[in-house]
Image: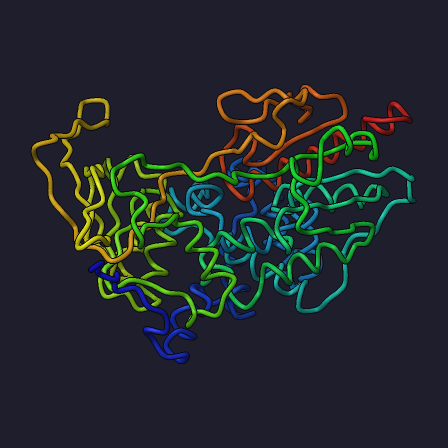
Amino acid sequence: MTRIPDIASARLSDAELAVNFADAHPPFTAGQATVEADRCFFCYDAPCVEACPTGIDIPKFIKAIATGNMQGSAKTILESNILGGSCARVCPTEILCEQKCVHNAREEGNPIRIGALQRHATDWQMEHGGQPFTRAPLTGRRIAVVGAGPAGLACAHRLAMHGHDVMLLDARSQPGGLNEYGVAAYKLADEFARREVDFLMDIGGITFEGNRRLGADLSLVELRRDYDAVFLGMGLAGVRAMGVEGEELEGVQDAVTFIEAVRSRDKKDVPVGRRVVVIGGGNTAVDAAVQARRLGADEVTLVYRRGHEQMSATPVEREWAQTNGVTVRLWSSPVRMVPEDGALGGVEFARGVATADGRATYDAEDTFVVPADMVLKAVGQIFVSDPISGEAVLVKNGRIVVDSAYRTTMEGVYAGGDCTAGEDLTVAAVRDGRDAAEAISKALSATGVAA
């Protein structure tokens, strides 16, 4: 008789789930924001600006907060990063702009809280309504944007600002991409991702069609025929397999699928094991582990094959996992899923030893087992090139190849975000989409025909 894994939904009450998935970092009050803004030196050639992938004029927007000009502060942010609200919540500001703050030299470990101030300003804009940007005179040009994640949304908004009409297409039913489906629910609480998309699209000129998949009911040839230009911002739709014995057992699933369920369903309907093992060392692994714990798992263990220094999860994310009751085990590589009466019973790991270059060697004879009802795999996502295979778009090392103007090797087709080589950050995807839109608009203006 096959044992049924102890995986169940509604482990906690509605009240407990509401607390566990509330906003992880409450926003500044107006008074707190003013006090924090007043700490800023408003540096000339500010290093924090150089560290921001979208180049937001950080001293300018903070000075506007300090002087009570909230509308001016928000517009300064949004003209560089139209998704500034979500980036303030999900981007690792502690290793980007805040790490470069000059206060670190004067007050070690106490930089200006740039991310929180950015959230304060963009939240004010959304709460008070109104689109701070207007469209240029209509050009009659039509651009197809494939992928409604951060890169595609930023591209669509900037193209609409330039007076072009945009058809925004996505394989999912709703726009938002990673922000809507792939980020921990407590980071973008209160339907913020959806409200931000509504705010962005309020500029006009953007039409969204969901459940449209490139390679299924869409082709690049057709899009290129019907539109003046095409932008590809599909992100990383594939999930890397571990390739270990027992990976097909019930109870083993991808962390991204689990996170999507938490994001898109009622929390009490999302099943979770009592003993959960998360395999991986990135922010996705942390998001999955913490959310499993907050859904009611008794034990959650995050296992990574190397050390803290090699984890792509930021120090803040690692600390967040541990303060939420997640056990972190390092230098351990999965060997196999251990069956128990035909179902998942645990995961066997080989112990590793660090080498001089920071890598590890593993002893196949020195193993241990972590009991588990559920395993969440977070070992990386990959770009799925099948939808554009056979087209004139060059893919190299698993990503679309683009030049400095975001042009692919197919005439009139541009790309940006995670499907191209880059930092795999939301803010970097926004930059790519924005800058690609500028390149597309410039090319259309120059040729008068097509990009």
The reply to whether residue 239 is in sight is yes
Residue 193, percent across and down?
A: 59, 59
Quadrant where the image shows the C terminus: top right
Residue 306, percent across and down?
A: 24, 35
> Which colour scheme appears in the figure?
rainbow
In the image, is 226 to the left or to the right of 89? right
Residue 71, percent across and down?
A: 71, 60
Quadrant where the image shows the N terminus: bottom left
In the image, is 325 to the left or to the right of 225? left
Q: Is residue 247 above or below residue 197?
A: above
| Residue at the (84%, 29%) spot, across then down | 444
Q: Quadrant of residue 414?
A: top right
Q: Nearer the viewer, residue 94 or 248?
A: 248
Q: Quadrant of residue 436?
A: top right
Q: Is residue 342 above or below residue 296?
A: above
| Residue at the (54%, 40%) spot, across then down | 52
| Residue at the (56%, 33%) spot, across then down | 419
In the image, is 440 to the left or to the right of 234? right
Report the residue that reaches farthest toward the left: 365
| Residue at the (42%, 64%) spot, across then down | 24
Q: Nearer the viewer, residue 405 or 410?
A: 410
Residue 139, percent across and down?
A: 91, 39
Q: Nearer the viewer, residue 377 or 136?
A: 377
Q: How many marks?
A: 0
The reply to whether residue 316 is in sight is no
Q: Is residue 91 above or below residue 391?
A: below
